[in-house]
Amino acid sequence: MATVRTAHTVWSGDLASGSGQVTLDSSGIGTYDVTWKARAEQSEGKTSPEELIAAAHSACFSMAFSHALSEEGKTPERVETKAEVDFQPGTGITAIRLTLDATVPGISEEDFQRLAEAAKEGCPVSQALAAVKDISLTATLHG
């Protein structure tokens, strides 16, 4: 059975000068201000759809990578993933860069890179974002 997670946004005004609030309904952990300026210029304490995508992608990738490691009998001490999402007004999301920094005892560099790439391809958020032509990964292993 599939799980369903929900969020909602209430927006007032036009795109350029309006504003809204996005609420994470399933978890109930917060409501966040969102504006066009936060999306296309400086965030100034507000969020954007691209920042929320970056959060989702970094979390999903970290989970997928941890799972891939466990299937190989490896347990990471630490997995940190940064996701950077490029947004070009008028074009859309043009690139996503994942940066993995992980401590995994007893794994070779070759296996680490292979599993990281497999996690990038297999992560459900990566798959959902397949329309983004440039999703890259830089993975650094700390033994």
Image: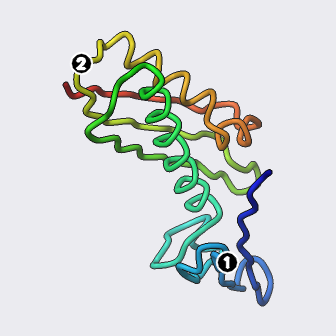
Instruction: Give the residue drawn at x 70%, y 31%.
Output: 133
Instruction: Give the quadrant of the C terminus.
Output: top left
User: Residue 26, percent across and down?
Assistant: 66, 73
| Tally of marks | 2
Q: Quadrant of residue 37?
A: bottom right
Left or right of 119: which side holds 129?
right
Above-or-below relation of 85 to 99: below
Q: Which residue is mark 1?
A: 25
Q: SS class of the residue under badge 2? A: loop
What amino acid type should be assigned to the residue bearing mark 2?
Answer: Gly
Q: Position of residue 141 (x, y in %)?
A: 28, 26
**Image coords of residue 4 (percent x, y):** 76, 62
Q: Quadrant of residue 53?
A: bottom right
The amino acid beneath tag 1 is: Asp
Q: Which of the pair 129/133 is nearer the observer?
A: 129
> Which residue is disc 2 drawn over?
106
Asked if residue 100 lies left or right of residue 129, the reply is left
